[in-house]
Image (tube, rainbow, N blue to C red):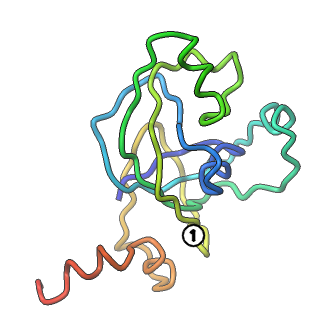
Amino acid sequence: MKCLSISQPFADLIISGKKTIELRNWNTNFRGEFLIHAPLKIKTEDCKRLKIKKKFVTGVIIGKAELYDVKKYNSLKEIREDQKFHFAAKKFQNKIYGFKIRNVKILKIPIPCKGQLGFFNVELTKIKNKDILSDIIDEEYRYQWINHH
């Protein structure tokens, strides 16, 4: 399954449903469900700016979401108009692609994982805990495989 590393506090803001656009300086053709990985590094300046005082989990996959569209920003004005959806500081508003996210789900049990740049693949077959697997692979996905072995 595809996975994307998103630094804290932004990974947490996505999982909580507050952040619905992830800014990037690169585009993607990928659409669909992906895992959200919170890397080891926490953006402490953003925590202060956003007044978030929380102990974050890091170095783990914390949830999943659906990337359903990519918005190309043509001006700084457009980026600033969407600030309430991406929460980026002004110095990071030079990113011109906004990954539009919906259908977020927090994992009950975070999965330890080393992050990578861009989208990367996580092999679900290596995850042995059935509770974690059932958390990742939702009912709709499981039902498509019934009687199709």
Figure quadrant of residue 9: top right
Residue in the foreground of this view, choosing between 75 and 96: 75
Characterize the local packing of mark 1: few (<14), some (14-19) or many (20 or more) Cα atoms within 10 angstroms.
many
Q: Position of residue 51 (x, y in %)?
A: 87, 40
Q: Residue at x 44, y 75 (%)?
A: 127
| The C terminus lies in quadrant | bottom left
Q: Position of residue 50 (x, y in %)?
A: 81, 37
Image coordinates for residue 103, horizontal then vertical, percent: 47, 58
Image mark count = 1
Residue at position x 40%, y 22% in the image: 72
Indicate whether 92 appears above or below 135.
above
| Secondary-structure class at tag 1 | strand
Left or right, residue 30 beside residue 35 = left
In this view, the residue farthest toward the front is 81
- Residue 102 lies, in percent from the top left, at 47, 52
Amino acid at pointer 1? Leu
- Which quadrant would the N terminus be assigned to in this image? bottom left
Q: Which residue is mark 1?
A: 107
Q: What is the residue that sits farthest to the left in this orientation?
A: 148
Q: Residue at x 84, y 45 (%)?
A: 52
Above or below, 79 relative to 132:
above
Position of 125 relative to 8 (above/below) = below
Q: Is residue 126 rendered to the left or right of residue 114?
A: left
Q: Is residue 94 above or below residue 27?
A: above
